[in-house]
Image (spheres, rainbow, N blue to C red):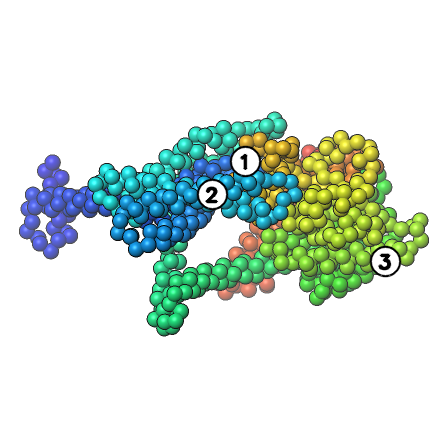
Amino acid sequence: MDAYRAALLAIAHSRSPHRHMTVDTVVHNDAMQWRGSGKAIANLSQRLLRTRVSTVEAAGLVHSTASISPSFETSLLPRTTVQQAVATGLAGAISYGLTATLQSSLEAIADRAIGGRHDNEHLRRAAVLTADITAFGTALVVRRLLRQRDHESVWRAVARTASFRVATGAAAGAVAVSVDGAVDTVRGEHDSGTVNLPVVLTTGAAAATGLHLARSRRLLDTATDIDQFGIPVRNASLVQPTQAIAVGAGVSVLLYGLSRIEDVVASGVGSAIGWAVPGLRPAAKAIGHGVALGGLALTIERAIAVATAATERAGSAIEPAYRSRPTSPHVSGGPRSSIDWSTIGREGRRFVNMTLSAADIEGITEEPAVEPIRVFVGYESAPSPNSRAYLAMEELERFGAFDRPYIVVYSATGSGYVNYVASESVELMTGGNVAGVCVQYSVRPSFLSLDRVGTAWESTLALLTALAWRIKSMPEASRPKVLLFGESLGSQAALGVFEKEGTAGFDILDIDHALFLGTPYASKWRRDWLSDPEEVDPDGMVVEVQSAQEFEALSPEVSDKARVVLLTHGNDPIPKFGPILTVQRPYWLSDEYPRPKGVPEGMRWFPLISFILVGIDLLNADDVTPGIFDAYGHDYRKDIPQMIRLSYGFDVSPAKMERIERALRHRELEWAERRIVAEKLDSAEQQIRATLADWGVDHTVLPNVVAPVKSTEPDPYRAAATSDLDPSLP
């Protein structure tokens, strides 16, 4: 104890100008400091407990807190804790904004109804409560009258959903006003305009708990390992509810804080406008909100522009694994090509460099093969869709594509990506006797290429039209078959070509068969076909399936006529995510129709919240592992080989298909490894060069120091170990 007192005295003397303090004085001062801190905390706690908010804010907070429960509803794909927190925060913030706006309007109506008697707190509270209850009852009646029906208009759905939001918002307002009255009765004071904040939050939490218990059987089951079909669920047990609620509350508070900042900015701008232009004073606050929101929109637009520019640079960058031009004379960028190698972008260089050789194909299929043709015209290879199509036709002619029995047109995703499982499957099943062609319309990811859909449609139409005219000029017996393949945004771009003609367009352009994977909801052609298949497809040549097994299970009458096949996974959010989710229950969540396989049985539709949840599902739709094929979400690699065989009508034996399947997986993993190794080596080489430059060493005069050329012989042990995986390996 003496040592402790001595230490205190030494510390006090070292930090205080008063050198002659006693130990008791030091202890007393520290105790006073701790008491002061405790008193400050107590004062802060009491201040928070006494904090009062307006009934408008109270209504918004009640609804915001209560919306936590629906934000945990099951969706198409499992969510991580952070993603769940974002969903909870967005749901809460939006609910707050809508309900606060509604309650403010209802209170304005109530104030106008009672005239100048605002000082009568009981009368004002009764008037506001009457307005809430009236709005609630009216909204329920409207919602019941506008019950959802097939082929209803969008405006009917909007009116029904708006009535639902009014009903829930008015209910939250009625709760807030009632709690206000109860609190005032307990306090013995009457103030119809404010409510105690802790009471509001407790009320909202109670509502959220009640909703949680009522829907507990349908909430996200974080312990489930299989779905209702007995299929294993990947990434189960991702969400930690307590963490998600805490982070979600933080997101809600952040968004609420941003809304208050926006209100302060709007008030400041409005005051300035009212002072400068008195005639605009009645509309000054509204103008202020417009300025504040306009500034926010401009900031978002600039951020998107920066992100777009960055992705375009990345899409045009030359990857270390694909710096060398291909040596095959049958591909774009090769020795016979007229297309500038520097203009075909990252995905184009991948597409042509990964072309199978005849030897590769023979080693896998154990049958004679020829060198396949691959043509890729980059977005920067020509200035317009027509000129790019012209370049593609020149390349096809130069490589002898019209002497091949098949020409496959690949409609790429936004970045120009062509699924190499699809292109390699076609080449392996045809023995390389095929030509593949792709015209790029963007170098950005699909979600940043939505403004290029028109360009994509023009490019695809120009190429298909040119192909049709060229093939029609040939003798009928020697005409190649044109096959069409599209995935994701590429499917939407290709199907847009036939939007006005329906399936007749496939006959007009002489397209033999087409396969489309994961077609986005934005595809009007697909939506029209789903809505009225007989109008779009009177001959029954379109089918939509979820797997190759489902296609094989079709009756011969259906499968024999199927020339256009849509492959759509039940749990793929991309074909399901659209603005209509905010106001209308989709058919795939209807109780009147069977749910597609993969749509969770416990998933229910909630206005606006389902839009948020399915939107978050997009982040998890394309989670792939190289070499491990899966049929899950937006990953179609496992389905592609069999669907290529079935939809294009290729005659391939089961033994050959098995060899192809194994080779496809091994090749994908091999290319992924090659890209990673090349990137790491390139990064290390750049670091070494930078270090040598700092030392003043000219590494160019030191051969084989930075990037030594290492001659290697084939490893017989590796060949023996891997020959059973891929017969094409040396």
Q: Could you classify mark 3 by the number of other residues whose Cα lies within 10 Å: few (under 14), some (14-19), or many (20 or more)?
A: few
Please tell me whether residue 536 is drawn above or below residue 467 in the rendered image: above
Q: Which residue is mark 3?
A: 469
Q: Residue at x 40, y 33 (%)?
A: 209
The three-letter amino acid code for the residue at tag 3 is: Trp
Instruction: Report the disc number at residue 604.
Output: 1
Label 3 or label 1, whichever lies nearer to me, is 1
Ranked by sequence position, the earlier of labels 3 and 1 is 3
Q: Could you classify mark 2 by the number of other residues whose Cα lies within 10 Å: few (under 14), some (14-19), or many (20 or more)?
A: some
Ranked by sequence position, the earlier of labels 3 and 2 is 2
Res. 1 image quadrant: top left
Res. 378 image quadrant: bottom right
Q: CA distance from mark 1 to mark 2?
A: 25 Å
The three-letter amino acid code for the residue at tag 2 is: Thr
Q: Position of residue 533 (x, y in %)?
A: 74, 42
Q: Position of residue 452 (x, y in %)?
A: 65, 58
Front residue of 14 and 177: 177
Q: Could you classify mark 1 by the number of other residues whose Cα lies within 10 Å: few (under 14), some (14-19), or many (20 or more)?
A: some
Q: Residue pushed farthest top? A: 230
